[in-house]
Image: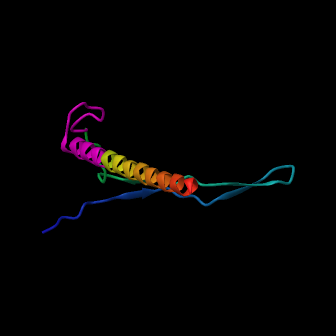
Amino acid sequence: MVKKANISRKTNSKKATKLVSKKGHNKVKAAHKSVTIDGSFVLMKEKTPFMSRRITMQTVYWAVLLAYILLLSLWILKIQIDTQTILDKLASSLLIK
């Protein structure tokens, strides 16, 4: 059986009032509404501080991802250098003839 929370809403509402100044300008003043919901949100303390120097599983995941990305970028750089070297050799052999 699920219990429903008792939520009481208190509202204070007023209609907008129109004030007319001596200069003939119309000013509309908005009414202030306040709504309170009792017991719906509870502030909790953090279990661990935000800036901690612990190594967690998430730290390991990020380190592995960083290493993978760096190795992949170095591999692509090597392929580009090898390709450029081959193209330079082909271009120089065509220019000699």
Colouring scheme applied when the structure was drawn = rainbow
Tell me where the magenta segment starts and ends, as one range: 46-68
Callout count: 0
**Percent x, y for residue 1?**
12, 69
Quarter that holds the C terminus: bottom right
Query: Is residue 51 at least partly visible in the picture?
Result: yes
Can see residue 34? no
Residue placed farthest to the bottom in the image? 1
Q: Quadrant of residue 55?
A: top left
Horizontal relation, residue 39 to residue 93: left or right: left
* Residue 83: percent from left, percent from top: 43, 54
**Left or right of 43: which side holds 2?**
left
Q: Is residue 83 above or below residue 58?
A: below
* Residue at the extreme right: 23
State yes or no: residue 19 in magenta. Answer: no
Q: Residue furthest front?
A: 97
- Residue at 31% x, 44% y: name it: 66
Residue 81, position as x, y percentages in the image: 42, 48
Counting from the top left corner in percent of width and height, residue 74 is at 35, 46
Q: Residue at x 28, y 48 (%)?
A: 68
Pick the residue in front: 52 or 58: 58
In the rendered image, the vertical position of residue 73 relative to residue 52, given as above or below: below
**Taking 46 as reference, is 80 above or below it?**
below
Using the rendered view, name the quadrant where residue 58 is placed. Answer: top left
> Which residue corresponds to the image point at 47% horizontal and 52% vertical from the top-left?
89
| Nearer to us in this view, 25 or 54 | 54
Give left or right: position of 1 versus 87. Answer: left
Of residues 58 and 66, the one nearer the viewer is 66
**Residue 59 among magenta residues:** yes
